Image (tube, rainbow, N blue to C red):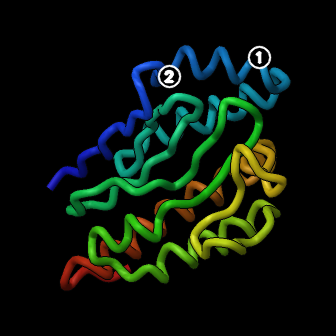
Amino acid sequence: VVAQPDEQKTRGASRKTLDTHSFETLLRETVDPGTADEVIEMRDLVDADPRMRVDYASSSMIFRIRPNDVPRELTGLVIYRGDSAAVGWLHGQMESIGAPVEIAHRFATDTAELVGASPPSKFPDTWGSNRSESSTDVLKIVHHRDAFLERMRQLADEVESALLPGREQ
């Protein structure tokens, strides 16, 4: 089974989805050149990993996790066109595929601790936002890039173990 991307949700005809070039351009207008280069480097690593995929929305770049033999991609990280990043939305995604929601909660807690973000408070699967005071600077993410990407791979392993009989982490 090949994971299919989530359907694009539109809020009106005026919202346009970014692409690689337009996101990179907006990012370079918002952050210093070194940070932009590091974000692009992280994007390229995600893009090269067969269990991950880069996606774009109207104001963000999304790193999706693609567990093997699971029919849905999961949101691993959202980087907004400004300089903030967030983790979230996994609770509902776990429910939709029949995986334990605790996997989502652990991922949010672990990654918040890893990058020094405010821990999940309002929702147990969410930290950071492009609109809140709890925003997490994207530089915190890229400084822990390898460990963050490894934790995304571990999330895929956990989902596979929970859903696929005989599969161990």
Tell me the residue at 81%/26% (across/down). 31
- The kind of residue on which mark 1 rests is Glu
Query: Does 54 appear above or below 121?
Result: above
Residue at the spot of label 1: 29
Counting other residues with Cα less than 10 Å from the Cα at mark 2, is it few (<14), some (14-19), or many (20 or more)? some
**SS type, badge 1:** helix
Tell me the residue at 38%/79% (across/down). 169
Q: In the image, residue 161 lies at what x, y percent?
A: 32, 79
- The kind of residue on which mark 2 rests is Leu
Residue at the spot of label 2: 18
Query: Does 3 appear above or below 54?
Result: below
**SS type, badge 2:** loop
Quick one: 46 or 64, which is closer to the camera?
64
Tell me the residue at 57%/51% (across/down). 77
Q: In the image, residue 126 lies at what x, y percent?
A: 62, 65
Q: In the image, residue 38 lies at what x, y percent?
A: 72, 33
Q: In the image, residue 147 lies at what x, y percent?
A: 65, 60
